[in-house]
Every structure is written in structure tokens, then in C-alpha cells.
Image (tube, grey):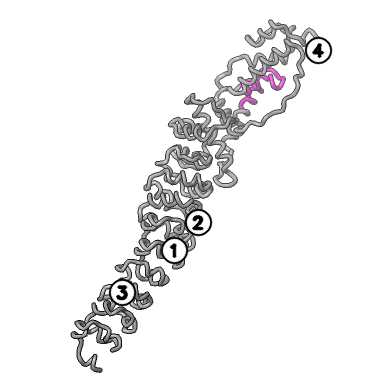
Amino acid sequence: MNTRHSRLSRKAADQLLDTGTARPDMVPHRLASLLGAAAADGREHELAHAEMAMAAFQAEHLVPVPTPRTEPMIKSPLAKLLATKVLAVALAVTVTGGIALAATTGALTGHGPGRAGVHQSGRAAAQARASVSARPAVRHGQAGTLGAGQLCRQVAARVARAQQHAKATADQAMSAAQLDQALASPVVSRTLTGPAFSSLLATAGSSTNVPDYCALLLRLPRLPLPAVLAQLPGNVLAQDLAALPAGVLAQVLTSVSGQVLAGVLTPLPAQALAQVLTALPAQPLSQIVGLLPASALSQIFSQQPAAVVARVLGTLPATALTRLPAAVLAKVPATVLAQFPATVLAQLPAKILATLPVKVLAELPTKVLATLPTTVLARLPVAVLAKLPAPVLAKLPASVLAKLPPSVLATLSPAILAKLPVTVLTKLPAAVLAKLPGSLLNG
């Protein structure tokens, strides 16, 4: 190539960039064609699929790969200026659909303008459409969470840019507060209209559910829309909640109302529910129990085996345990129940209480003890029996009554006392003995 044709003056370079034309004897043909194509406006059919191509590009390159810096190969100052302008124009054209334009003019193939370039542009647009439509849906779970999380960050970044409250891009880290603020914005629904987020919408169920779904994926301590958490698909909730760290899980669940919380927990499969319940520390678990209605508590714990119920309930304070239905407490082993406060045990049916150790029963209120079978009462200490009302004592065997103090026996009817040995009766007050048949004492 002639040296005269290899070098460009500033005037020739500016003319090429501004008009796309220059004197043929001053510019190599291929360079003139490329610059002309880049400087010209895109045609309607060439830009028809620019938005789709852009969405496919962004979905494929959510996280940019850093490129190593190399030493510049261009030494001439004028050549550097031209190269800088060409790169700037090329970048702008790439984003707005200029790749198809360059293919149309033949600047990238060296064939010049013609019908073949139009076919190449059509193929490029078709490939872009195929890249979007053929992309597999982001699977929810271990394999797909990373991709869904990236899409969530992309949504937040676009919302942030739209609101102009942060110069956020897909590759810039946003804080938890920024992510929460962006996902809570109504702009999210408009951002999700692009085809790049179709898999995100499919997993979350609707655009309304995406903010909370993304918050769970990104492990944010707050939910952007806590009132709609229960609207997420059950399988999504089960996986996301069970995957959250205990601290974040506690913050998420205690941030919603009791009605929403019941709608979130009760539909969960038993295994996922067990993971959620056992992961929560005692304090937030107690708070959650306080938020849930008794019907929801009964349904939640009815799904769990006794071991899980015992483990969960064993961490709750008495104030939380008193709200649990008796049907739930009945599933807890007696060895665990024995550790519960008497105020909690008092709610249990007599059949369950009968399985508790005597030491535990002795702490129960008298009115609760009065409901126990006689066989259970007979095992109680005399000091505990002495507090029972006379109608309850009357049901006890004579061998048990004989151990009671005379002051307690004096409250019994003569018919009950008549069953006692004479050695016991002689210890009764004279006023009580006077009511007994004389034959009892004479005998």
C-alpha cells in the first residue's frame, strides 16, 4: 500500500468521521467503507431488532470480564486520535444496532454494499432473537440461583438508573439498602417488560412477586413488599426460606403481619417447615409464635414429628408456650413436657398429664390435679393430696386416705371414714367421731 494512502491528515480524519466520505486517493478503500458505515444513520429495517439484540447481549454478559491492559501499538499522535474516535463511534454503533449496519454495507466483510449485506443483517437479528427465546429458564435452586440473583441485581441497577438516585450499573456492587430501595420502587414492574427477565417473572409468578423473590435470593434483611410475601409460589418460598441464614430468616419472618406469616408458613411442606422452624433462634421464634393465630400454630406443628416439635418448643419461653394448642403440646414427649412451666402444662388434657412424673404433677394447680385419674392421684405426695377437695379425696383408696392428716380426714363424710382402720379413726377429733356409728369404734 502506498504510504501516502496509509496516513491520514487531521482534516481527512474529521471529514471521514463527520460525513463518511473523503477523497479516494487519501484513504484506503476498506477504511473509508467502515467509517462511512459507522457515521451513517441506521436504517429502519436495520434497527428493528436493536432492542432485542441489546437485551440478549445484556443477559449474556451480566458480569463483565476484565481484560488485561496492553501497551498501545499506535505510535503516531494523529493515528492515536483517529483510533480513539473510531473506537468511540464503533462502541456507540454496537449498542444501537450498528453491527447489523456494518454488515449491510459490507464493511466487515470487504464485499461492499449490496444484497448480501442485508442478508447478513437479517441473520444477525435472527441470531439475537434465537439467543433470547432459546435461553433456558433460570432454574430455581442450587444450579439456577446464581443466574436469577444476577438478574435481580440487573433489575435493581436499571431501577436505580431510572430514578437517578444512584449511578448504578450491572457490574457495580449495590449495598443492601440500595437494593432494597430499588426493588421497592414501582419502576420494577416497567423494568421487567424486557425479554431478558422472562425467566425471573416465570419463577416469581408475577411482576408483583419479583421484589420479594429477589430480596430472598439476595438475602436482604428486609422485604421490599412484605404484604405480598405469601403470594410467592410455595416451592419458591420453601427453597428460599430454608436457604436463608438464621439471622436473615428471623428478620424476614418477623417483619410481616400474623396473617401474612400464617399464609407463608402453613402451606410449606413438612420438611421445609422443619428446616425453617429449627433454624430460628429462640427470641424471634417466640415472636413468630406470638404473631400466629392458634389455628395456624396447630396446623404448623401438626405436620412435624414429635422430635421437631420438642426441639422447637424447648426453646420457647413460657409466655409463648401458653399460646400453643393442647393438641400441639400433646405431641411432645413427657420428658420434654416435664421441663415446661406448670402454667403451660395446665392446658394439657388429663390423659397427657397422667404420663408426667410425680415431681412435675406436684407443681400443678389443685384444680388441674382434680381432673386426674384416681390411679395417678394415688401416687402423689400426702402434702399435695391434702390440698385436694373432699369430693376428690373420697375417690381415693382407704390405704391412701389413711396417710392423710386427721384435719384433712375430718372433712370427709362418715361413709368414707367408715372405710378406714380403727387405728386411723381414733386420731380424729371427738366431734367427728361422734358422727360415726358406735360399732366402728367398739370393734
Image quadrant assignment for residue 94: top right
Residue 335 horizontal side relative to residue 85, left or right: left
Residue 355 appearing in the image:
no
The region drawn magenta spans 98-123
Which mark lies nearer to you, 1 or 4?
1
Task: Residue 110: say if magenta.
Answer: yes
Q: Depth-wise, is mark 1 or mark 2 nearer the camera?
A: 1
Instruction: Mark 1 or mark 3: name the one nearer the start of the chain.
Output: 1
- The residue beneath circle 4 is 1
Q: Which of the marked residues, 3 or 4, is nearer the chain's N terminus?
A: 4
Which mark, by number, is residue 271?
Answer: 2
Q: CA distance from mark 2 to mark 4?
A: 75 Å
**How many other residues sit within 10 Å of disc 2, few (<14), some (14-19) or many (≥20)?**
few
Mark 3, secondary structure of its residue: loop
Q: Which residue is mark 1?
A: 339
Q: Which residue is mark 3?
A: 386
Residue 68 in the figure: left or right of residue 195 = right
Relative vertical location of residue 290 with respect to residue 169 in this rendering, above or below: below
Disc 2 residue type (three-letter): Gln
Query: Quarter holding the C terminus?
Result: bottom left
User: Could you say whether the residue bearing mark 4 is in a helix, strand or loop?
Assistant: loop
Q: Amino acid at mark 4?
A: Met
Q: Earlier in the sequence, mark 3 or mark 2?
A: 2
Residue at point 21% right, 82% down? 432
Residue 120 part of the magenta-drawn span: yes
Mark 1–mark 4 Cα distance, whole angstroms, equals 95 Å
The number of callouts visible is 4
* Image depth: mark 3 or mark 4 in front: 3
N-term mark: 1 or 4 = 4
What secondary structure is marked by label 2? helix
- Give coordinates of residue 407: x percent, y percent: 26, 77
Image quarter hosting the N terminus: top right
